[in-house]
Image: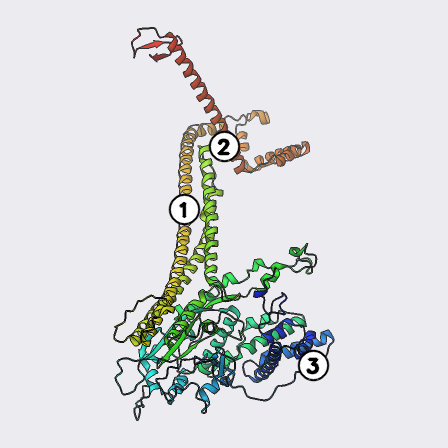
Amino acid sequence: MVDRSRVSCLRVDEHHENVRNPLVHYLGCLKVAERKEFLSKLELKSGCEENDRIREDCKKSIEKGLRRLQFLRDTLSKDEFDRNLVESVKTAGREWAEVMGRTKNATKPGPKADYKLESDMSAYVMDFSMTDNGHDGIPGLLGTFPDQKVTIQRLLYDDNESLLSRGKDPKSQKMRYFHIPSNNMEKAVSKYFGDEEPRPITNHRLVEAPQQTPASMILQDRYWRGHLHGSSDSPPHARYMAAMCDTVSSKPGETDLEPNNIVLFMPFLHWETSRKRKQFAEETSRLVEQAKKKRAEDIKDEKERRRRERGNAPTDRYLRAAADLYEGITTYRDKKLLRKYFSTESPIHPRRTLDQAFYWTLRSTEKRDRDQVVFRGTTTRYDDWHRCSKEDSKHWPDHDGLKGEDCQVCLANIKRVSRVVMVDQLWMWVLDERTIITCFSKRYGQNKQDSSGVHKSIRRRVEMMGPDAMRTVFELGLIILDECTSTFFNRATGTEQPRVTDEFSKATGNIMDKQTSAFNMIVALMEEKHIRYLQSQNYVDTTDLFAPLLDINYEAKLEREIVDVIEELDIMLYIANIHADTVKSYIDQVDHILNPGGELPRCRRRNRGKMESHEPPNEKDYYSFTIKALECQDRVNSHVKDLETLRKRAKNVAEDVARTVSMKQQQASVIQAWQSVRQSDETIKQGRSIIVFTLATIIFLPLSFITSIFGMNSYEWSGSNDSNQPLFFAFSHWARTLIWSIYKKNTTKFLVFLGIYDLCFEYKKDSKKLMKDVLKYTDRTKMEAKEAWLKKREEKRQGASTVTSMNQTPGTPKGSFRNDGVGQWYNV
């Protein structure tokens, strides 16, 4: 039964009542012939104002999305690097129309306008000002609290806008939160304080010292560029901000002993599809080459070209080209962002894979990225796909018996999308104890339905909170830190996000199962070896036991897999420990701000709803923060504990695999030593026999030769007394060859004629097998004879014991001997 609460667009299940994204549903779920009817239904009035408003919003969303897609398509057709995507769709469309006998409608060009990145990117804004109706948000912005957003152009670059400005009252208690998903932090901080962007300090001597401003104090090198790891010449994944959390003053020319601004940089774990990761890895590599060679290069490599040309049918090429174009449209904004800021000296945070974040000195980690545990767990293996018959391409043996129904295995394999673990960065500024500015990456492309998005999780959490649940901006900072550290471990964030802990547990369990099978095979070989040792006292061929023990290829693969698991868990533990240290540092810095004199006890666990009314507001703020800080710290520590548990289990499996390899090698050494001893015994026996034979040959061979030569009588051959004729026959090669050839020819012909020669083929046996059968027969005969002799001796002893007890007379001293009458003496 289908769970309707989890059904969404782009699913084969019925979901007309659960449309989360109207544009995706319109383009991906409806047939072309159904789209016009769908739009017409949205125009109908239902009599309910709420339903009519929802339908109108749905229609506007679809029309706006279609206009945006057309605009991006026109933009890509003019782009130097991505125009090939549009050309491929046009070419494939014309070929498909010719084959299908249809007329391809010309695409209407959209409005002529230049693409501007800042106008296409949006920043999220949360204004926590309270009214009688709750959080109303900021008028004039798109959406409602907490989902309001504004374009980067309007927020940062329009002079008449003051949304980000801190205002004339720096001590105002109004809380605000701005999330800027791009590298505009210098502009954002400067806009907040109303200052000019600070110039970076270079090695060249300046004519005049730069003027200190609040923005330059916040963005001074020790808190900004000084934490940038790598440079513009470093690999892209080597450029990141080192983790830190510290307070910083924004008062130029003053000694601020109690600064109320916090700067924080911290990595956190997220995920990405393997295909998009590869696309942006290629885009980054192209930008690196472009920066070095000062010219543009084609981003398509030979492998991608061959993949696109595999489809021979026009329909295949058309669909593939359309899919590539759609991916190009959805990721164009991210590519433009990367192209704009990649070559600048400002700190950037490109998305890095798990191995890139740890092995940042490597030029390329492509092989390591495709060997991730999560990638292997979410990728359909080659052997799992159903294939058609080699003789008949229309016959699928695995689909026999389906009777025209869809194969569920094939559908499940098609739906699987390869994923990889990514490492993003959180940049956060807390300014004047009332404003937070953050910046961190998101997944590539448009992922509106992705519930694993970090900022979406923050918005949902703020939305569910009560009006008085957040007292200070520092508690909002705790929520941001908590979501960044917990989203990757949250099991209820959506169906697309990989269950990382489950994948690692599954990988460890599979390796453990394979190790158990390998261990059972070794035990079976040992039992077979033990049986053969007991059954035979002579040389036994144990090649079939020895060869499997020498082959450790299977165990070596298991060793490599479990080492990869432990290595990735170590990297994740490293990042989780950074989370714990950063959260602890953030709590310490806020403690210095809210409790500068240290008069209030830091750890005071109380119920949030029982704040005493007589307490001053600053104490209430401090205790509220302390309670939430301890909870956040406990959750981060629990993540570290979970990863340590997984690593401990993987380490135990690795030890079991190593123990299996060691046992296999030891058993191979034992069998080899046993064979060597048996071969040595056989060699000694054969050597003794050869010595005896050699001595007999030395004595009798010369005598036999002499007697054979001189014992020939020539008179029997020719009737004469010529004594030289025996020597002629003895030493004449021609004479002996002629006689032997006549004998051999006639004898062979006679044996073939009688059929005796055919019997040799029927009863012919391999020499080794014949030797083995003879040894088995002799061993069995000896064993039977030995058992019969032992049985006979036992019976004889029992009979003698009976005779002795009968012949013993009373008074016979113990220890004397008596004859039983048959020549045997027994102790009585």
Residue assigned mark 1: 663
Q: Does the CB distance between marks 1 and 3 fall below 8 Å?
A: no
Residue assigned mark 2: 775
Residue 5: percent from the left, percent from the top? 57, 65
Residue 112: percent from the left, percent from the top? 59, 89
Q: Which label sits in the foreground, 1 or 3?
A: 3
Q: The residue under label 3 is which amino acid type?
A: Asn
In the image: residue 31, left or right of residue 188: right
Task: Give the structural element (helix, strand or loop) at label 3.
Answer: loop
Residue assigned mark 3: 105
Mark 3 → mark 2, Cα distance in angstroms: 87 Å
Task: Give the structural element (helix, strand or loop) at label 2.
Answer: helix
Q: The residue under label 2 is which amino acid type?
A: Leu
- Looking at the image, tell me whether mark 3 or mark 2 is earlier in sequence order: 3
Q: Is residue 652 visible?
A: yes
387 vs 174, nearest the viewer: 174
Q: Which label sits in the foreground, 3 or 2?
A: 3
Task: Give the structural element (helix, strand or loop) at label 1.
Answer: helix
